[in-house]
Amino acid sequence: MLGIESSCDETGVALVRGSQLLGHAVASSVDEHVRFGGVVPEIASRAHLEALLPTTRRACEEAGVTLADVDAVAVTAGPGLAGALLVGVAAAKALALALDVPLLGVNHLVAHVAVDVLVSGALPERSVALLVSGGHTELLDVRSPGRQGSQGVGAMRVELLGQTLDDAAGEAFDKVARLLGLPYPGGPHVQRAAESGDPAAFPFPRGLTAAHDLRRHPYDFSFSGLKTAVARQVDAHRRAGGELDERFVADVAASFSEAVADVLARKTVTAALDRGVQTVLLGGGVAANARVRGLLAERCEAAGLDLRVPPLRLCTDNGAMVAALGALALADGLGPSPLELATDPGLPVSTIVV
Ligand code: ATP
Ligand code: MG
Ligand code: FE
C-alpha cells in the first residue's frame, strides 16, 4: 500500500505491507511559512506539487520497491486545506489509474489513530484517542474489532466524543509563542522555554472544567480563554515596567504548558474511564510536547490505563499513517473509492473511507 499525505504543510509518502512500514519520506514547507507566522494555503499547495514526485521516489528507494510493486494507493481525502488536499488526491488518482490498482481516499484524523498498527501490530478492539495538532484537538472513541476478534468480523468505527470549541492545542502553543516573542512554529520553542520555568508561577485557567461546563461539555476543549489570560499576564508585566526576560518567559511557558497538559490529560482519562476502555492512543504534532506526554502518562498509569504514543516522526503528519489506514480499511472491506473521488476539507471523523 502506497500512502500519500498532503492535507497541510507536510508532503508525506510511504509504503507499508499490512502493518509493516517498508519506507517513508516527508518533505515539509514549514520554513516557507515562518515569515507569515502560519501556514499560507497557496504556498503549501505549490510546495506539495514540487515535493510529491521526489518524495515518492525517496520513499520507494527507502522501501526497496518500484511503483510496479504497488498493489493499492491510499491518500488523504480530508479534512485539510482544499488546495493542498487536491494535489495529493490528483497524484493518487493518476497513480491508481496508471498502475491499475485500487484507490482509497481516507480520513486524515483516523489515519493519525491507525498509524499505531505500524508500532503495535494491531489496534486495540476499543480505545479512546486524543488527537492534538496545529489544526485539531479531538477526543475519539475508536472500535477496531479485527478479523480474529471474538466479536467476529467488523469494520473499524470512529465516533467523535469531543473537540475544541475554539483554538486547537497546537494553535494555542503557536499563539502563546508569538505573545512571548518566540518564533513560529511555537510549540518546540515554548517547550524549551518551559524547561527552566515554574509551572505553578501563574494559575492559568483550565477551559471547560468547571462543574457546569463539564455537564454540557464533558469531552470538549477551549483554549482561547487560556490564550487571553496569557496575553493579560504579558500586558500586566509590561505595564509594570517588566521586560520579556528569560525568567518571565520561562514561567509563563511552563504555566501555560501545564494548563494545556492538565486539561488534555484530565478529559482524556475521564473519557476512557466513562467508556470503559483499557487503552488511550495519543497522536498529532502536540504529542511531541514533553509535558503533554508526561502528564498523560502519569494520569493513565494512576487510572490503570495503557497509553500508546507512536514515535514522534509518526505523530506529525506523514504518509505512513495514510498507508496504514488504507491497508486496515481494505482488510476491513471498506472502499475502494471511485476514481472521481472528491476532496473534502471538512470530512467528518466518522467517515473513514470516502
Ligand atoms: P494537522 O492539524 O492537519 O494535523 P498540522 O501541521 O497543524 O496539521 P502537525 O504537523 O501534526 O499538525 O503539528 C504541528 C503543531 O504541533 C504546531 O502547532 C506545533 O506548534 C505543535 N508542536 C510541535 N512540537 C511541539 C511541542 N514540543 N510542544 C507543543 N506543541 C508542539
Ligand atoms: Mg504540519
Ligand atoms: Fe495531522
Image (cartoon, rainbow, N blue to C red):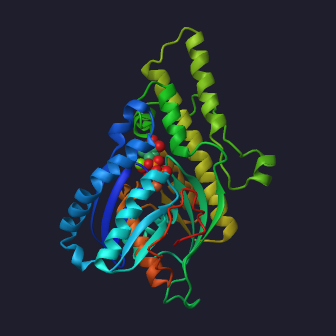
Residue 352 appears in the figure: yes
Q: Residue at x 58, y 52 (%)?
A: 265
Looking at the picture, tell me which residue is in the foreground, 231 or 337: 337
Q: Residue at x 38, y 30 (%)?
A: 35
Q: Is residue 310 left or right of residue 226?
A: left
Q: Is residue 197 above or below residue 41?
A: above
Q: Residue 16: x and y, percent?
A: 32, 73
- The residue most toward the top is 241
Q: Is residue 93 above or below residue 180?
A: below
Q: Residue 349: x and y, percent?
A: 58, 64
Q: Is residue 329 above or below residue 266?
A: below
Q: Quadrant of the N terminus?
A: bottom left
Splitting the image into 4 quarters, where does residue 218 fall?
Answer: bottom right
Splitting the image into 4 quarters, where does residue 280 fall?
Answer: bottom right
Q: Is residue 263 above or below residue 308?
A: above
Q: Residue 10: x and y, percent?
A: 37, 51
**Number of dots carrying numbers:** 0
Q: Residue at x 68, y 42 (%)?
A: 207
Residue 285 appears in the figure: no
Q: Residue 303: x and y, percent?
A: 60, 62
Q: Is residue 195 left or right of residue 299?
A: left
Q: Residue at x 68, y 52 (%)?
A: 220
Looking at the picture, tell me which residue is in the foreground, 50 or 32: 50
Q: Is residue 228 left or right of residue 313?
A: right
